Structures are given as C-alpha cells and as structure tokens.
Image: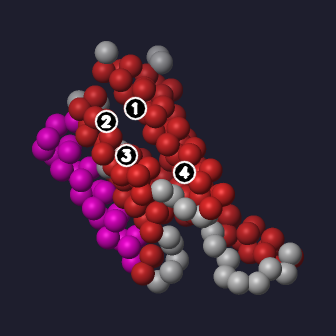
C-alpha cells in the first residue's frame, strides 16, 4: 500500500514540477502556493517511505533549511529568483542528501547551459533590458530524473 502511495506522491511531485516549468517559462514566476504545496506534502512522503523521526526527518529538515539559507544568498545578489530558492528548499525536504546533491549538480549544469543559450538569443534579437533566466526549468529538469530513476522506476519492479 505504501509503495502505491509513494508512486502517487512522486507522480504528483513530477506534475507539480512540470507546472513550475510552465509558469516559470511563461511568466518567470514559480507560484508561492505551488512551492508551499510541495513543502507541505513532504511529511506524507516521509511517512510513506518509512522515514524515522530521528535521524531521517531531522536530516530532511536540515537539508531543506540549509538549502534555503545557501540559496537565499544567491537571491540576495540577484542571481536567482525567490520562487527558485523556495522550490529548491522544498525539494530538499523530499530528496535524500545524495540525491539532493546530485540534483544540485545537474541543476547547476542545466542552469548554466540555459543561461548561455538565453544570453545568445537575447543578443541576437538585440533585446534591451536585463535578461531573466527561468531557473525553475533547470531545477525541475534536474529533479524529475532523480524521482523517476530512484522512486518510480524501482517501485515497479
């Protein structure tokens, strides 16, 4: 029963991340209610995956909290939007530390590539104003394979 619930939760998170991609691309915004829903669903994920209160839940809370603090620095210098920071912190509540770190690496690579492509397009089109990068795309694109590989794919076996 828990396996089915885990698959439903992982599928729901993938759907939420696809919505984040769409809203970030369309309006350069990741809605606060979406980030809140992702964060508030994490305890269901912990329960369904059999995570112990100590150290399991404590570690997940620490990952989310540390991620929030670190990426608030990126927000403070204008390198990342607030919705991106909140999304990363919310995902820190879901992904175990090795998966979260792998997601951060892929997010950084994908975000860098996205930035270069958008900068080139911005210059080719001779657009004025500051370029806004929809970094939520890189965040979601790095998270979805982590979820599907570790959680959705393995539960079906």
Q: Secondary structure at mark 1?
A: helix
Q: Is residue 61 above or below residue 85?
A: above
Q: Is residue 125 above or below residue 86?
A: below
Q: Are marks 2 and 4 in contact (CB under 8 Å)?
A: no
Q: If you read the primary sequence from the N terminus, does the residue marked by circle 4 or circle 3 appear first?
A: 4
Q: At x 48% / y 31%, what residue is drawn?
A: 11
Q: Secondary structure at mark 4?
A: helix
Q: Tell me, for residue 37, which label it has, or none.
A: 3
Q: Residues within 10 Å of mark 2 (few under 14, many from 20)?
A: many
Front one among 35 and 56: 35
**Secondary structure that dominates the magenta span:** helix
Q: At x 74% / y 75%, what residue is drawn?
A: 119
Q: Secondary structure at mark 2?
A: helix
Q: Tell me, for residue 134, which label it has, or none.
A: none
Q: Are marks 2 and 1 in contact (CB under 8 Å)?
A: yes
Front one among 83 and 64: 83
Residue 20 in the magenta stretch? The answer is no
Q: Tell me, for residue 20, which label it has, or none.
A: 4
Identify the residue under disc 2: 45
Marks 3/2: CA–CA distance: 12 Å
Q: Residues within 10 Å of mark 3 (few under 14, many from 20)?
A: few
Q: If you read the primary sequence from the N terminus, does the residue marked by circle 2 or circle 4 appear first?
A: 4
> Where in the figure is residue 124, as x and y percent of width and height?
86, 76
Q: If you read the primary sequence from the N terminus, does the residue marked by circle 2 or circle 1 appear first?
A: 1
Q: Which residues are magenta?
A: 51-73
Marks 4/1: CA–CA distance: 16 Å
């Amino acid at each position: 029963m828990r396996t089915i619930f885990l698959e439903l939760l992982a599928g729901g998170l993938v759907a939420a991340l696809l919505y984040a991609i769409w809203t970030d691309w369309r309006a350069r915004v990741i809605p606060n209610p979406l980030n809140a829903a992702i964060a508030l669903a994490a305890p269901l994920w912990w329960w369904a995956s059999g995570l112990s209160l100590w150290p399991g839940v404590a570690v997940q809370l620490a990952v989310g909290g540390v991620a929030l603090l670190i990426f608030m620095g990126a927000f403070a210098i204008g390198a990342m939007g607030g919705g991106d920071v909140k999304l990363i912190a919310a995902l820190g509540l879901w992904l175990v530390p090795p998966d979260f770190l792998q997601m951060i690496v892929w997010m950084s690579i994908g975000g860098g590539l996205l930035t270069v492509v958008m900068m080139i397009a911005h210059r080719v089109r001779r657009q004025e104003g500051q370029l806004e990068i929809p970094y939520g795309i890189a965040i979601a694109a790095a998270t979805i394979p982590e979820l599907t590989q570790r959680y959705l794919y393995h539960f079906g076996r």
